[in-house]
Image (cartoon, rainbow, N blue to C red):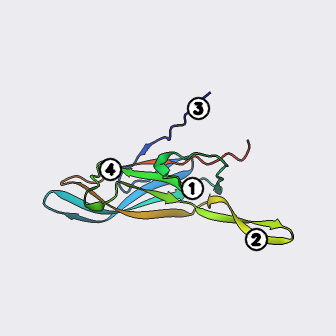
């Protein structure tokens, strides 16, 4: 039996946060410039944990991440600018990433720290900046696809 999982997409409005599963997603235009045939925007995309608890992602052995996350298990979400052209070596989207956490691991009396997974503490926020080019006269339009966090009770 094959099982397919679709990532839910959430449409975003400029400077108006939208929440899904306790994470608030938003984007802010920091700078804009209009040229002869296009508009160039510097944008910050943000994910903030407002769930009331710490969110933890464990990458299980054999997990295949959806290609939108570019194989990155630390990605919380993928922001895509739906009207970006990608011209002049600019972006069409970006991932925001959780911070890794480490746990002690002891072998033959020697303890070392190994990466245990990724987390987003309650109230904390992660962001990244990108530059997008859209057709002249348009403002960037974003949607976000959140990564599914693992359930701790399998």
Looking at the image, do the residues carrying marks 4 and 1 touch, with CB atoms under 8 Å apart? no
Which residue position holds label 2? Answer: 112
- In this view, the residue in front, 3 or 136, is 3
| Residue 146 higher or lower than 109, as above or below | above
Q: Residue at x 49, y 51 (%)?
A: 69
Q: Which residue is mark 3?
A: 3
Badge 3 local density, few (<14 within 10 Å), some, or many (20+)? Answer: few
Q: Which residue is mark 4?
A: 141
Question: Of callouts 4 and 1, which one flags the residue occurring earlier in the amino acid sequence?
Answer: 1
Q: Nearer the viewer, mark 4 or mark 1?
A: 4
What secondary structure is found at the residue carrying circle 2? Answer: strand
For residue 123, which quarter of the picture? bottom right
Q: Crowdedness of circle 4 by 10 Å Cα count: few (<14), some, many (20+)?
A: some
Q: Secondary structure at mark 1?
A: loop
Question: Is 135 positioned to the left or the right of 106 in the image?
Answer: left
CA gap, disc 4 and disc 2: 45 Å
Residue occupying the far left of the picture: 36
Q: Closer to the N terminus: mark 3 or mark 2? A: 3
């Amino acid at each position: 039996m094959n099982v397919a999982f679709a990532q839910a997409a959430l449409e975003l409005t400029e400077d108006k946060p939208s929440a899904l599963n306790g994470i608030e997603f938003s984007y802010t235009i920091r700078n804009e410039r209009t040229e002869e045939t296009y508009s160039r925007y510097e944008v910050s995309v943000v994910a903030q944990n407002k769930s009331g608890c710490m969110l933890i992602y464990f990458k299980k052995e054999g997990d295949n991440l959806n290609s939108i996350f570019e194989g990155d298990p630390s990605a919380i979400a993928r922001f895509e600018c739906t009207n970006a052209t990608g011209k002049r070596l600019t972006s069409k989207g970006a991932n925001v990433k959780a911070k890794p956490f480490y746990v002690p691991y002891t072998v033959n009396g020697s303890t070392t720290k190994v990466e245990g997974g990724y987390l987003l503490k309650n109230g904390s926020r992660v962001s990244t900046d990108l530059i997008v080019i859209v057709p002249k006269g348009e403002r960037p339009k974003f949607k976000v696809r959140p990564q599914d966090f693992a359930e701790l009770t399998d």
